[in-house]
Amino acid sequence: MQKRKLIAGNWKMNGRGAAAAALATQIVAGVKKLKDGPEVALCPPFPLLSTVGAALAGSDVTLGAQDCSPHKDGAYTGDTSADMLKDAGCHYVILGHSERREYHKESDDVIARKVAAAHGAGLHVILCVGEKNPSTPDDVKEAILRAQITNGLPECAHAGNTVIAYEPVWAIGSGLTPTNKDIAAAHAMIARLLPERARGLRILYGGSVNDKNAAEILAQPGVDGALVGGASLKAEGFLRIAAGVVRG
Ligand code: PGA
C-alpha cells in the first residue's frame, strides 16, 4: 500500500505571534505549489495554536500540538486537555517526545493515558519512540522500542488514528543521524513490533532532519515521513524537506 508521507514540523518552545503567522503563511503558500506533495502538519506551542490555525485555514496544511493532558476538564492547573486542542482546530498531537519523557518524567503509562485521551477527543497521535544511546545493540534497541510501543499504545490506537515517530534521542538537535541502513532497519523493527490493529501505520523518522539529508532519508524503505524540529522554523528549508518527498 502506498502511504502518503507526512512531514510534521515540531516547533518546540519557539515562536511569537506575527513571526509565527508569517512562517505558517509562507509554508502554506509553498506547500500549495508542490505537485503530489506530502501531507504537511505544523505543531506550534499552545499559545500560537490559534494564530497558526488562522494562517492554515482553508489550506491542506494541518495543525498539531505537542502534548495534552491525560485528563478531561477540571482542576489540573497548567494542563491542556485533548478536547481543548480539538476545539482549537488541531488534527494531531505529538505525545511521548523524548523531551517530555526526560524533562517531565513521562512514563509509558502516562503516555498511554494521554494517547487514549487524544483518541477520545478525535485527535490523531504522533507517538515518539527511540533509544537514547547511539551504540545501543540491536537486541537492546528492540527491547526499548517494544516497551515504548506495547506500553505506550492503548487498545484504541490503530493504523487510522496513530503515527509513530522513530526519534533516536541522540540524533535530536545534535546534527547527527543514524546511517540510512540503520534508519531502515529501525523502521522495519518498529513495523514488526506493532500490534495487529496498528499494522501499516505511518512511521516517521525524526532527529536532525534538514534540507540536505531529507530526500535520502525519506527514500529509505519504511520511512513514511519526517518529524522535523529545528529545520521546521525556517520556511525555505522546511519546504525543501517537503519537496524532497516529491523528488525522493
Ligand atoms: P530536530 O528535532 O529536528 O531539531 O533534531 C526533532 C524532534 O525533536 O522532533
Image (cartoon, helix red, strand yellow):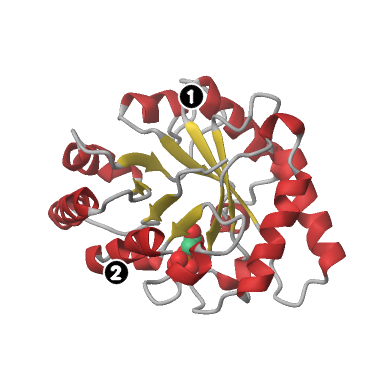
Q: Position of residue 223 (x, y in %)?
A: 56, 56
Foreground tag (1 vs 2):
2
Residues 193 and 221: in front is 221
Q: Position of residue 27 (x, y in %)?
A: 22, 54
User: Residue at the location (36% across, 67% down)?
Assistant: 231
Q: Is residue 101 above or below residue 72?
A: below
User: Residue at the location (45% across, 74% down)?
Assistant: 213
Mark 2 — residue?
Answer: 237
Q: Is residue 146 above or below residue 178?
A: above
Mark 1 — residue?
Answer: 75
User: Residue at the location (67% across, 57% down)?
Assistant: 187
Residue at the far right: name it: 139
Left or right, 53 with reference to 43: left
**Amino acid under disc 1:** Ala
Left or right, 214 with reference to 169: left
**Amino acid under disc 2:** Gly
How far apart are the two marked residues, 1 and 2, measured between alpha carbons?
A: 41 Å
Q: Position of residue 141 (x, y in %)?
A: 79, 62
Quadrant of the rendering where the N terminus is positioned: top right
Residues 124 and 202: in front is 202
